[in-house]
Image (cartoon, helix red, strand yellow):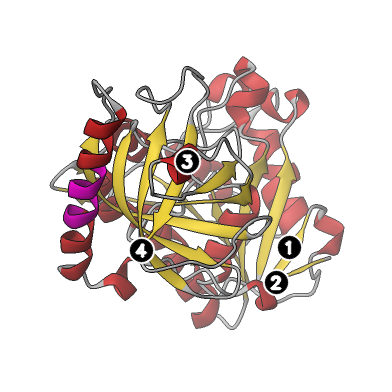
Amino acid sequence: MHIVDDFKKLPHDNKYKSVALGNFDGVHAGHRELILAMHEAAKKNNGYSIVLSFVPHPLQILTGKSPNMLTAQSEKELLVAALEVDYFVRYPFTCEIADLSPETFIKEILIDGLGANHVFVGFNFSFGKKALGTPEVLQEICSSYGCEVTIMPAVRSKHGIVSSSLIRKELYEGDVLTANYLLGYSYYMKGIVVGGKRLGRQLGYPTANVAFRKEAQLPAYGVYAAILETENGDFLQAIVNVGIRPTVDDDLKPSLEAYCFDFDGNLYDKWVTVHFVERVRFEKKFASKDDLVEQIQKDCLVARDIMSRKDLPKLFSQITCANQIDVI
């Protein structure tokens, strides 16, 4: 997949161009259905498959604050690359873009910029000044340019319509099982293992302290069964604490710490990915360190049992295709 931030870097030949528009945070099950439909149209017409996503999140420009993101930009691109898309366009979102009329947006970005022949959007897609552009408006204006528009219906689950907002809600409530179901893979957080206060080691459970990006969506404070993936490609079963460690610390800054089962290697200064499998319990303050240690022992047994019942390979995202990406 080629990543571009300028329309001039796209091919400007006469080949068919099929385009998916959206933010695609998390590249969840609904996003993938849309992107795969777009890709199929490109394949059918021997053309290019193109994903256009605005950077930064439009709400950052419009309101000064964006939601906590399920995926970093680079992670989003890897997830899209796994769907064998030809081009990913990082299009800069500015106040000027937000102020475009729907007609100007379509002509300047989709027709003149991308040369789109077929555009795919979700049922709730909006664009243009004051979000006056709806999927139906897009369909009507694009037709005057001979550009087809497909409006993808909502992807429904037993938990509701699949959306990034719903997934954030489930994570906020600590329900990683449902979040994983809606994503179609295990929710994960990446970071470098840094030195901490060695509080876990003092309790007999040395942990890897993972420095995560501040914009990330943390699951609810609690203890989780997880898989820690190392930069060497090893997958280590682990128990993870997300929170402020109220029994042993008075620092209110949340941390992400992983205790890996049956592992005595060195992870300091290494990149790791924490794949959340299932919540064991919510975080709580114990009366003593001894009580905490006793609970950790129980937590480890629960986490091992959870792991023994899971088809772990199916939980992991298909995100090991960095060699298929180039920035042009």
Q: Position of residue 45 (x, y in %)?
A: 55, 80
Report how far apart the C-alphas of labels 1 and 4 lie in the structure: 39 Å
The residue type indicated by label 4 comes to Phe
The residue type indicated by label 2 comes to Ile
Q: Nearer the viewer, mark 1 or mark 2?
A: 2
Q: Nearer the viewer, residue 266 or 219?
A: 266
As drawn, 45 above or below 75? below
Q: Position of residue 178 (x, y in %)?
A: 23, 47
As drawn, 20 above or below 36? above
Give me the disc on residue 256.
3
Q: Are marks 1 and 4 in contact (CB under 8 Å)?
A: no
Looking at the rendering, in which quadrant would you find the C terminus? Answer: bottom right
Give me the disc on residue 37.
none
Q: Earlier in the sequence, mark 1 or mark 2?
A: 1
Disc 1 is placed on an element classified as strand
Identify the residue at image location x=17%, y=42%. 159
Q: Which residues are magenta?
A: 296-302
The residue type indicated by label 1 comes to Ile
Q: Is residue 159 magenta?
A: no
Identify the residue at image location x=37%, y=34%. 165
